[in-house]
Amino acid sequence: MPTQKQIIEALLFASDSPVGLSTLVEVLEGPSPQETVAVLNDLERDLRESDRGVVLVEIAGGYQLLSRRECAPWIDRMLRSRRKVRLSRAGLETLAIIAYKQPITKVEIDSIRGVDSGGALHTLLERNLALIKGRSKAVGRPLLYATSPEFLSYMGINDLADLPELKELGSVMEDRERAQEEIELISEAEVVSTEGAT
Amino acid sequence: MKEPRKDSTVAEIAPEGHSSIRVHIPVFEGPLDLLLHLIQQDQLEITDIPIAKITRQYLETLELMRELDLEVAGEFLVMAATLMRIKSRMLLPPAIAEVEEEDPRAGLVRQLLEYSRFKEAAQDLSRLETDRRLLFERGAPAQLEDPEASELLPVSMFRLLDALKTVLSRQVPPIVHTVHAEPLSLEEAIGVMRGRLLESPRLLFAELLEQFPTRIEKITAFLGLLELLKQGSIVAAQESLFGPIWIEWRGEAVQIPDVLEEENV
């Protein structure tokens, strides 16, 4: 009879995507979620402390065995060109807007970027990094876009809350207030000059 | 070459008499991106843009882009009009002092601030992406190398065109833009792709076109791809309706250059 730890390791090994805790609990048919998490933590420590080539990570709301960071150059060499291409700047910008403002319509994305994002959006949908969440109630019922579970996996994060904080609205507001002040200064100066002229 | 399609595109990128010139030109995602670049270049405050100066530099850049036959998207022209409108409004004295008029630049300032926020966020995502790419999950390529295992769907011409559009919409990364007097010919493009496919018989559409740096070369390569498809040297397939498109090598066709010649007649 294999141990829980062996079974969990085997399950994670057999999957090429993150496995959720609920799936593990369901498959194991015995240990509680808490007990399962304890075994997972144990396994994670085992792998780390015995200097293995794989690590256990919590990612996209699940658990996954991934290769050790330091081994990347060798895997790259083995896979050569078989890797997916990195996202373009347009893709990253569009994805960032979706990630922080979801759900969001294409028109809103276009207006923030000041340029048509159709191509970038298409790529993101094609690569399953973004998905259509529904329709807005606005005129024309435009489609609403959101990030997908694959997005979390692609960025190596567990949850949307793990995204780096968007540049504080506060500091932008500050900038804006400062802008407002300067604008006021300008208009006052202009008022003075026009008054002087009359 | 007699190939009509190609001739017209050649003229676009390298007008007669132009020798190969090297120009340092960053690639701009859009008008806001270009404006931010101009502002940062001169270390100006977003909130206090010298509108006349920026407008001039902006128009100069558009002119350069046009000279290089880079596609100047409509949005760039709309922004040029906006800048000129703001400039002219700044020249007008406020009509009535009582009315609190907003600075003509305020709308643009808000747009630039909002955009720069997400530009930074995009850089954060890029760092996450880079970091995540150092960790490999199990089994991804193995699955791809077994054509029989997955039910591949045929790819329609429209999907191929879509894929081309996607590839073209990805901006070219290079810092140095080279304008060749003699760009890639259709035969050369086919040769390059054949070489690549003989090395690894199954490649992503995007990977295959990745090695052609410019838009025009990508289009030439795409035409070459269609030619190879017609000859049956390659097949295009995908695993799911919106999945990535794979190009697979199926062996040398009988007559390669003849087909091209026929079309020229």
Image (cartoon, helix red, strand yellow):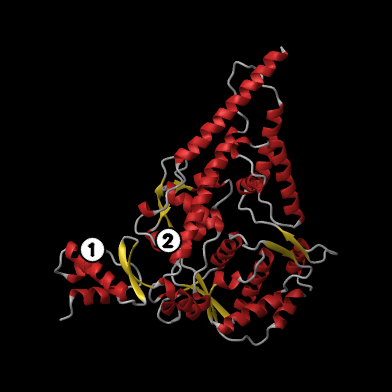
Q: Which mark is residue A155?
A: 2
Q: Residue placed at 74% from the left, 70% from the top?
A: B183
Q: Is residue A180 above or below residue A152?
A: above
- Tell which subunit mark 1 falls on: A
Q: CA distance from mark 2 to mark 1?
A: 22 Å
Q: Which mark is residue A22?
A: 1
Q: Residues within 10 Å of mark 2 (few under 14, many from 20)?
A: many
Quadrant of res B106: top right
In the picture as drawn, the residue positioned furthest to the top comes out as: A198
Q: Is residue B54 above or below residue B67?
A: above
Task: Find residue B203 and report its horizontal and vertical position in percent.
Answer: 53, 76
Q: Nearer the viewer, residue A151 or B46?
A: B46
Q: Is residue B264 above or below residue A165?
A: below
Q: Is residue A175 left or right of residue B95?
A: left
Q: Is residue B190 above or below residue B109?
A: below
Marks 2 and 1 in Cβ contact (< 8 Å): no
Task: Find residue A61 and report its horizontal and vertical position in percent.
Answer: 31, 60
Position of the N terminus of chain B, as image quadrant, is bottom right
| Residue B76 visible at all | yes
Dot in front, 2 or 1? 2
Q: What amino acid type is highlighted by mark number 2?
A: Met
Q: Are marks 2 and 1 on the same chain?
A: yes
Please tell me whether mark 2 sits on a helix, a strand or a loop.
helix
Q: Residue placed at 45% from the left, 60% from the top?
A: B128
Q: What amino acid type is highlighted by mark number 1?
A: Ser
Q: Which mark is residue B108?
A: none
Considering only order in the chain, which callout, 1 or 2, is on the residue closer to the N terminus?
Answer: 1
Q: Is residue B233 left or right of residue B63?
A: left
- Tell which subunit mark 2 falls on: A
Q: Residue placed at 52% from the left, 62% from the top?
A: A87
Q: Is residue B57 left or right of residue B168?
A: right
Q: Is residue B10 left or right of residue A122?
A: right
